[in-house]
Image: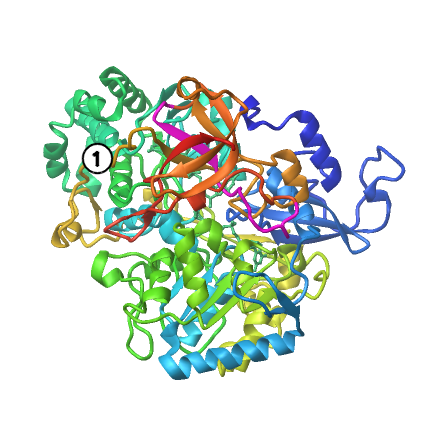
Amino acid sequence: MARADLQITRRQFLKAGAATGAGGAAAASGLGGTQAFAATSEDAWYRQGEIETTFNVCDMCPWHCGIIVHTVDGEVRKIDGNPNDPKARGQLCPRGQGGVSFMNDPDRLQAPMVRTGERGEGKFQEVSWEQALDLIAQELNKIKERSGPEALAVFGHNAGDWWWADHFAQAWGTPNAAKPSSALCVSPREEAAELTFGFPIGGYEPVDWANLETVVLIGTHIGEDARNTKMQDLAELHGRGGQIIVVDPRFSSAATKADHWLPIKPGTDTALLLAWMHVFIEEDIYNHRFIENWTTGFEQLAEHVADKTPEWAAEITDLSAEQIRESARAMADTAPQTVIVPGRHVSWYGNDTQRMRAVYMLNVVMGAYGCEGCLHFNEQPYLDDYSLPPYQVEGAAGGCAADPDDDDDGELLGELADGPTGKTRADGVQERFLRGPVALQELIEPMISGEPYRIEGLICYATNLLHSVPKTERTIEALKELELFVAIDVLPMEHIAYADIVLPEATYLERYDDLYALAHKTPYIALREPAVEPMYDTRPGWWIAKELGERVGLEQYFPWDDIEEYLNTRLRSVGSDLDDLRSRGGIIVQEGRPFFEDFEGESPFTTPSGKVELYCDRLAEHGQDPVPEFEPVEEPPEGFFRLLYGRHPVHTFAKTQNTPELADLYPENELWINVDAARDLGFADGDRVVLENQDGVTDGPIKLKATQRIRRDAVYMVHGFGHANPKLSQAYTKGASDNRLQSSYALDPICGAAGLRVNFVRLESEA
Ligand code: MGD
Ligand code: MGD
């Protein structure tokens, strides 16, 4: 996937590789234990001592590839993709290579701290772990006595969030546990899948890439979205001459490889999807056998799309009717080995569950499910939980589902029980939404308004509150209102300055975590073990959770002596233990049931009808459209552009901009703007501008990238820049923050996801 626009030169890659002890996107050695490498220089790191090898799961992004970590004399020197890991397949992306630099970031949080100044001032005093944990326990118990356990919210993301947003929250008894990877990311696609197929799509998008002939990417930009496995899959497909169709208002990296690029008007994808289905049905190129055997509601669908012609959609989408017809026929040519991949960050405009339903329905119209080269069925690995008493609240926070034990997401969507004192979740799901995991952004308001009841305490584990949640000013106001705010993090992100108590966690290279038990075509279990001792006075999340749990009377939920006993107990259920898992290269792979033939005549679909529900009675009963309708989104006001955002291959969200080696590769984000639009405004490539949004919020300055590669009505920036804390020495003031400019969002009425692409900006010269 060598693309000029990745903006990483070979020289830069080699530079990063040298510093991390790796040569760019490296293949694994595949060797374990002490080993010798071909020598190139006498003082090379691998000649400086014994090489120790440990197994881990990369935490540089939520994709979580299996990795092998090489240390020499207690120092991490090299990370490889684990060849046994079905995600890494022996490869690793630049962010994965950057893990060493992330761990060694001198700006890391180094000791527990208690706030001494005003909230937001960032003044703290270092304390011992005992003092910090005793203090938190005391304050938590006060909240529980005064207002019940539901008055505590627990946010969590990334590896390790199970200890907090799932286990601790359920043991404590709060239904107000949430992950940013739900309502700010995947929940529309998970809800749409549940309504259509009866189960969520899951963290590992189930596409049988190996046998795929055509891939359709709708607003999901593999290449910049640098998930290792997906990059490999797309490159392989391209290499063997497979067809690529990209729908994106921007000429993305994937678009540069595409046979068809459809530069759609933002927010109009549902119209395109309906018109594509119209072509399939009208031209009788749909999969009759699949429709007859496995679906209900096809007649209603056919009737619904009868007037959704390419001409109708052309008016809406700004594409030509001919392009719509041609691309539909190109899809039909290779169907059913044609898949529209479910995107990942799919909370766009507030009507996203319906758009995702249309995506699934078109896959089904092509018959692209349950056979080679199609969508397949993922299976959860067999692995017992550690035996524990029933939780106070049964349920968990949902999430990106690349999380440990990710089948939780499926079981729990919209089904969280009330708290022990009878209070339901405070995000208003019962009143406003049909279903959905707890919507993190909807728990902010109750901290301020006290409606439906006041959230008084917050434990925030690995969630970047002022970069990942829209309406930054509201979040700051909420943090100021809290009685207790505990932040568990590794870096001094902006929200840390508002915490009462800060707990510094050891990074993933320095700790054990729960096992990764991933639903996959070949379900598998992966190990995270420490490669080195924790730096500074930091501790692993599992240890912090247990220590705190024991201090607040939850010892029965933390009965294990230590993490190794916990892991060995779970592993025994699959006839393994830690030593055995290490001897197997850190991964246990089990057999899956990916295709229809594996179900021996039983329906794999778990909807009420046992079939794919093209017409959804459950939606109709709740006053929602039973088949997706196109709903127009608000147009940019005069003089404004729609603000779009996305990923850069060497950064993850807002957490790696301070990682020295990655900051070196891409230090600041740019604002993509159509070159003609820039010229009309009197701007040129490289100018620095300040952005003002529709609510008068400003951010920047940011450098302009004036290009033909984006439509005139939108601008685009990489998410995660514009850090405002001087303690982040690399990232401070570099670029602009999309999040600060997202002072509005549109709520999806089905799942409560927050559509972030409803914000608009105008450009002003830097003063
Ligand atoms: P990150 O910026 O990666 O995003 O939301 P987040 O996960 O909140 O923040 C990770 C946080 O964990 C940081 O504070 C980091 O310092 C900390 N951290 C890193 N490693 C560790 C560790 O080992 N232990 C602990 N305790 N902390 C650690 C992501 C979410 O954001 C998602 S999934 C999506 S798809 C959305 N994307 C998105 C967007 O594109 N734009 C905007 N504006 N908002 C978004 N929100 C969502
Ligand atoms: P986005 O990054 O939001 O989602 O990755 P994706 O699922 O790929 O994709 C944005 C794309 O949508 C852009 O190309 C934008 O131009 C296009 N777009 C904007 N509006 C519209 C529209 O109305 N219609 C259409 N058709 N397209 C539109 C997110 C994914 O990335 C997630 S959720 C995670 S957890 C991972 N995070 C991550 C990371 O932080 N860094 C890197 N390098 N890779 C990552 N991979 C994953």
Assign a secondary structure to mark 1.
loop
Residue 481 at x, y = what percent? 42, 67
Reply yes or no: does residue 715 show up in magenta.
yes
Q: Is residue 604 above or below residue 550?
A: above
> In what quadrant of the picture does the N terminus appear?
top right
Give the residue at x 11% y 27%: 307
Q: Residue 74 versus residue 586: which sits nearer the camera? A: 74
Region of the chain picked out in magenta, as a range = 711-729
Reply yes or no: does residue 383 show up in magenta.
no
> In the image, 333: left or right of 45?
left
Identity, as a three-letter code, of the amino acid under mark 1: Pro
> In the image, 48: left or right of 154?
right
> In the image, 162: left or right of 307?
right
In the image, farthest residue toward the front:
767
Which residue corresponds to mark 1?
Answer: 632
Residue 397 at x, y = what percent? 39, 61
Please indicate, yes or no, whether residue 601 appears anywhere in the rendered image. Answer: no
